[in-house]
Image: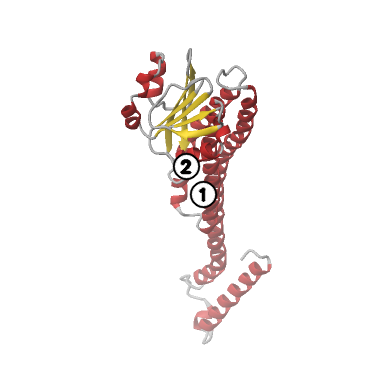
Amino acid sequence: MLKYKKSTNKTVRIENFEVPDEDETLWIFYHSPEEMKKDAILDKIELHHLAIAAFSTFSEHPKINVYANHAVVSTFYLETDSLEPIRINLLIGTQYLIVLAEHPTPFREQLVKDFKENPEHMQHVSYMLYYFMKDIVDSYLEVVDQLSNEFLELEKSVFVDPLKREIGHKVYRWKSRLHKLRQYVEAEEIVIQKMGHDDFEYANEESGFYFKDLLSSFSRVTTAFDSFKENLKGILDLQMSLKSDHMNRIMKTLTLVSAVFVPLTFIAGLYGMNFEVIPELKWQYGYFYVLSLCFALAVIIMGYFKKKRWW
């Protein structure tokens, strides 16, 4: 827990919850519901029963609910490695911001360090909310960069081995994951929009500009996820195109080979007919004549194909 006092412009760590004075703000970050229950903090704050239910229960999608004296925000932090979302609830009061995470998050200590080194970041609850949401947005941006590299490698693998069936399986799995992540992104954007709106009572005039800048950064995430869907479709189309090209080259080779052997087959069939009078059959050099003829025809035909650049 951190407490900021405007008169001294200092941030201090406290062990127990205290109702803040008019010139104080509080920052509380719980890593799990069990950690919050130990403090029994909800019993020390007058909350609407709907606000208690919304804050104590993790939502499946980002959202914001505004009550008489509080607001509850459900948001998601995306882990860069696993791309799994960590659900986080925020309880916003006029002088405090309480954070409840589903699992331990990597940026809690980073925020604590920032608030200690820059006490002015805690002078209003909207500033604390902004710096918290900034880390949330940064997690989405890091995921965008990671996915961009992942899809680039996937596209390269198509050129290496277009016949590899695993590529199609990966594309399908990524499309399913992107569809789910895209729902979080869309809902998260709506939450940030509401925080930066003039009607949001927990934001002051200056913080509104910060949230609009944050929304501008987050728009890159929305655009990127839309482009990722097109990229995956393009990778699948590219693989199908390369597969077709590969099959066409195989069919072309087989056709050219067949074209070489068609006249040779004709010659073999001609001298294999059961007529009594075939002059070359009794000729001493007939066998070598036919072999030479077949070889010459094959060379001429392949030379013609080579000249036309068909082979």
Q: Position of residue 6 (x, y in %)?
A: 56, 27
Q: Position of residue 220 (x, y in %)?
A: 61, 37
Labels 1 & 2 near each other (Cβ < 8 A): yes
Closest to the observer: 62 or 36?
A: 36
Closest to the observer: 249 or 144?
A: 144
Q: Which residue is under mark 2?
A: 174
Residue type beneath disc 1 = Glu
Q: Secondary structure at mark 2?
A: helix
Q: Secondary structure at mark 1?
A: helix
Q: Which residue is under mark 1?
A: 150
Residue lying at the far front in this picture: please name it. 8
Picture layout, residue 33 above or below residue 260: above
Residue type beneath disc 2 = Trp
Picture layout, residue 49 above or below residue 182: above
The quadrant the C terminus occupies is bottom right
Along the polypeptide, which appears first: circle 1 or circle 2?
1
Q: Residue at x 47, y 50 (%)?
A: 167
